[in-house]
Structure formats: C-alpha cells, structure tokens
Amino acid sequence: MSHNSLFAGIDVGSSFTKVVLLDPAKNIYGSDIRFSGTNLRIAAEHGLHTALQHNNLDSRIKRIVATGFGRKNVVIDNQNISAITEISCNAKAAQFYYPNKALSIIDIGGQDTKIIKTRDGKRISFKMNRKCAAGTGMFLEELALKLRVQPTDLNSLASESSNPNSISSYCTVFAATEILSRIREGAALEDMVRGAFHSVVKRVMEIDVLENEVVLTGGVIAHNPTIVEIFEEELGRSVFVPPFPQLFVALGAALYALEEGTSI
Amino acid sequence: MSKRKPIHAVEELRNVATDYYQKLDRASKDPFQKVAWCSSVGPAELLLAFDFKVYYPENHTAMLGSSRIANKYIPVAVAQGYSPEICSYLTSDIGAFLMKETPLTKAYRVEEVPKPDVLVYNTNQCRDIQEWFAFYARTFNVPLLGIHSPKNIEEINQSHINYVEEQLKQMSDSLEKISGNDFEKKKLEETVHLSLETSNLWTEVLETAIVVPSPFTFFDGCIHMLPAVVLRGEQISVDYYRLLSQELEERVENGVAAVENEKYRLYWDGMPIWGKLRVNSEQFLELRACVVASTYCNSWIFSDLNPQVPFSSMAKAYTGLFINRSESSKEKYLQEMTKKYQIDGIIFHNARTCPYNSNTSYGMPKRIEEQTEVPNLVIDADLNDLNVYSEEQTKTNIEAFIEQLAGI
Ligand code: SF4
C-alpha cells in the first residue's frame, strides 16, 4: 500500500451527506458536509469530489465504505464500495477516539437518535428512538420553523437562559404549539428554547440507561453545544464530545475502509 | 443473491386451503349446515364435535395483512369508532366486511365470508377478540359465546382448569341447542384426538429446525401453520403435516438448509409483520441468518390435549398458552427455546396494535439478555397496519444487529 493511498467513508444521512478521507496513518485528508437532497448518489459523488479538494485524485482512493440511510445508493465509478450500517460505524469511530473504554454513545441525528453501547472494543447493544421525531433534530427544526428563527440560532438563544421553561408535550407538533402559547403568555423565548433542549435530552435518556462513559455525536450536537451542557447537568458527570461530531459516522466508515483496504 | 427454497408441500397446502374455504362457502349457503366462527385458540374441538363448519376470522384478516390491503380497510373501522390503536386484525377485518370485500374471492373464488350461526371466542389471547366477535354477533344477530380464561398465569393449577372446564361444559349445553345436535362424548374424544395428533405433527415440523443448518424458517412456518390453525381436529391437517414433516426430514437427511450457508440462528418473538413476510425473509436470507424458531408458530402446540379427558384437557391446553402466562413464566420458556435451538440472537417484534403478543412493554428484552446472554433487538412494527412500519429503519436495525453478532 502506498502512503499516498486514501480511504473514504461516506455517510449518506437523511438530511446531510458527510464524507471523510483518511490517509494510511489515520489522519483526515479531507472532508465534506452537504445536503443529501433527493439524489443521494449525486450527493455522495459531489461530496467525495469536494473532500478530494477538487483534485483528480480518484486513483488514490483504495477503498470506500458507505453508511447511513442511503448507503446502498452510493455508486462511484471504478470503485468497490461496501455498505456498513451507521450503528457499526459509530461504534468504530468511538473505539478510535476512546479506545478500551466501555461506552454509551449517543448519536442525535436529523430523524433518529441512537444509543450504542460498547464494551471491550465490541458493540454489545444499540437502541433507536421509536418512530417519532421527539428527541431528534427534526424536533428542533420544526420548533425553529414555528418560532421563525434559524435552526442555527437556537443554541445561542438557549445559552442565554438559566431558567429553562419545561415543556410537557411529547409530540413535536403539540410541543411547538405549547411553546408558542407560553411565549404569548409572557414566557421568555430563551427559556422556552432551553426548555426544548431539555425535552430532547429527556427523550434521549428514555431510550436506554446511560452507563459508563458517555459520548455525544451527530449533527445536533455539532450545532448545539448547549445540549452537551444539559446532558452533563442531567447525568451529573462530564461527557465526551469528539472533535467533529457531525463527521463521526463518516470517520467510522473511513476506518472500516482503511481496515478493508489494508487487509487485501 | 441466494434464493428462498420452495417447499414442495406448498402445492398441497394450496389445495387444502381452497378446499377448506370452498366447503365453508357451501356450508354457509346450505340451510341444514351450521357455521361457527371461532377465535384462533378457541375451543375448536367442541364445535367440530357438534358438526359445525368452523371459520376463523384471524386467518381471514391475516390474509388482508399479507396481501397488503389492510390499510385500505382500517380507516373504515376507525370511522365507526374503533380506535386505530386497538388490534389491527380487528380493524382491518371489520373494515373489509363493511366494504363488502374479502381476499377469499381472489384466492379461493369465494364471494363473501361465511355467515355465522354462532360466534365463539376465548379471552386466553386477549380482550380485543371479544369486541371483534361482538361486532359480528350484533351484525348477524346470532349468539356470542365466550370462555373467560384466568390471565397471566405463572403455573397452571387445578382451580384454573376447573374454572375453564366448567365454562366449556356450559358452552357445550348452549351449542347443543344452537346446532340441534346432541352432545356425543365419542365425537369430542375423536376431535380432541385429531387435534392432538395435528399438534404433535406440527411440533415435529417445527422441531426439524433444531438441526444445524435448519431446513425450515419462521417465515415458512407462518405459511404452513394454516392447517394447525383452521383444520385442527380434522384428519386433513394430520395428513398434511405428515407430508410436510416427511419433506423436511428429507431435507435434514440431505443436509439441505433453508438459508444457504446458515451463519446465525435467530428467534422471533411476537407476531409476523404479515405484509412484509417476503421482505423480512429475504433480508435474513441475504444476511445468512435463519430465524429458526418463534413464539408465534409454537402457539398452536397443544400437547396437553388428552382424548380420555376431553374437557379438562382442553381447559388445560387452552389456558396454558404462552400468551396467557406471566412474564416470568414466559421468560423461562424463552430461555429454554434459546438453548434448544442454539439461538444467537432474539428479535422482539413490538407490534403497535397487539400488546398481548408483544413482550416488550415490561422490560422483558433486557431481562432475557441478562438471563441468557443472548443479545436481542426490538423492532417496532405491526401485524397488519403498515402505516406504523418503517422499512428503512427496520432493515437498518436488522442489518446492524447481524453486524453486532458478527463482531463487526
Ligand atoms: S391477540 Fe392481538 S392480534 Fe390477536 S386478536 Fe388479540 S389483539 Fe388482535
């Protein structure tokens, strides 16, 4: 294997497509995040090209592992692609950053949230939220829409509050209505948004018991560090957040690609 | 991609099913022949002893599920005030009835479901069955008879048996009047005897899957269980399972695996997702995972039947069903099954509209994992209502579970 070789992980999520390229020494050579849109194949192709910094370096790619919702849709000319679920890729990346630790990894994505547990370097269980947007990025997106703020503004609003206003509704639609009516009654927007963050954390903590070290990953964590704070408050201990939470799964896929590419 | 291996007996199964439904149709039109509707784990033997032709709405509604038309009918029943949260067998069946449609027409050239002279249920399975049958009793203005079983049983005891036996005897008196036939003990002994034989042969069929690699899957079982459900107590089911059992024995002798290169052996707890039987079975096939055993297919094993004491043994067999047992008693059963079938992983199907067949609400998966050290996966779906099923999420969950078993 040449030291020029590259190994790609492509995570085609329902909202975003993420690409990570690793060199043989496991350094990140390039990455990309873009909307998945309706054509998942094109999103993956363009993402890979951007991660290659628009150089014509396709021949350096030795192996690609696709993951995420659209993992079976990835087709790149002249490339052998294997598909591994995002659950395994998540655990893989976590083992890379936090080796030899028993972990509870929480991945809060656009449409689903997962809790994956590892012990002795092996994945021992995983659980997903039930079929409902509560506790996922969709809940926050819906909220931003109703409040007419940008989803990216939610974090700074929540960070300004020290008095979260708790939300009783579980359902995304009802919760948004509840928040609006409370604001009309005089509640501060910041307190309501922080309350909504608390609600996301509560829903996640219902999925499984959070044992051992807790790792937080996924797009929602990448954009909303206040959620990390709330998790730490609720758990009464600190949690790990990897350097690029949104790229975490793609990195896991790239690590698999590296493993596959070097074992042949 | 490897292919599902067809079981040859399926041809005969088609004949058996066609014959069964066409006979029912004729009986329905014959003023001298009485038809009884019976719940799937109801006292069929007693009905047969009075010469009723027996129809099982659960089989009918499973056909609505497997042909993926249930969601056309569920809203019709919901509009009548039946909640979308209750049994989707019930809502699809009643909806189809109200729309005057039945899958029997396409499958067996039968225009409508047979008209009942009596409806008979047993609450051993659930409460919904009673409401379901009550709808038809009102609609057809015919008697509704029920066995009200003691619930959540840890160990079955004599008082449970006496209580149900007494109800069966009272039911027998009512059936005598409705059928116009006298009760003949000999006849009941005969139907119980045939039911027991069916049950024993069905057990033999299911247990061929103990062999590694297994010649038979849960998905095959869901298709081939029909005679055990609708024809127990009749010679035809005995003959059918002799045939099937022989074919599977041959598979075993020749080392024929249902799943080529079987690598993982799984257990399925809960109901099938009828409209996705093919999708699910093909995914497992691709992953080289064989679902070798299930709670569901084993529900039609009634080893406690005894022709010499027909009433009390029926009481015991029907009250002691898995679905009617306590959590800890169910856990013991699952522990035994995982050992007996060398299970690598358990799939718990949490069916949205059937809490009775879903063992995921009181913490069982977690406890079973601790007791057996066999990992498990819970999938959220339903028996008939595909609106609550997400194909993508289910497939990813199953794939990730197999990756976990593979140590990836
Ligand atoms: S056991 Fe479940 S599926 Fe069967 S009738 Fe009762 S509620 Fe419906």
Image (spheres, rainbow, N blue to C red):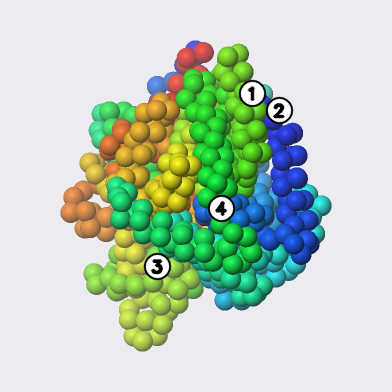
Image mark for residue B227: none
Name the outermost residue toward the left: A236
Q: Position of residue B97 (x, y in %)?
A: 69, 66
- Of labels 4 and 1, earlier in sequence is 4
Q: Chain of mark 4?
A: B
Q: Label 2 is found on which chain of the structure?
A: B
Q: What residue is disc 4 on?
A: B184
Pointer 1 or 2: first along the chain:
2
At mark 2, the secondary structure is loop
Q: Amino acid at mark 3?
A: Tyr
Nearer the camera: disc 3 or disc 1: 1
Mark 2 residue type: His
- Observer-side mark, 3 or 2, equals 2
Residues packed near mark 3 inside 10 Å, few (<14), some (14 to 19) or many (20 plus): some
Q: CB atoms at circles 3 and 2 under 8 Å apart? A: no
Q: Amino acid at mark 4?
A: Glu
Query: Decide: marks 1, 2 in contact (CB < 8 A)?
Result: yes
Q: Which is nearer the eye, B243 or B323?
A: B243
Q: Secondary structure at mark 4?
A: loop
Question: The C terminus of chain B appears in which quarter of the rendering?
Answer: top left
Q: Which residue is mark 1?
A: B247
The answer to whether any part of residue A84 appears in the image is no
- Is B116 displayed left or right of A24 in the figure? right
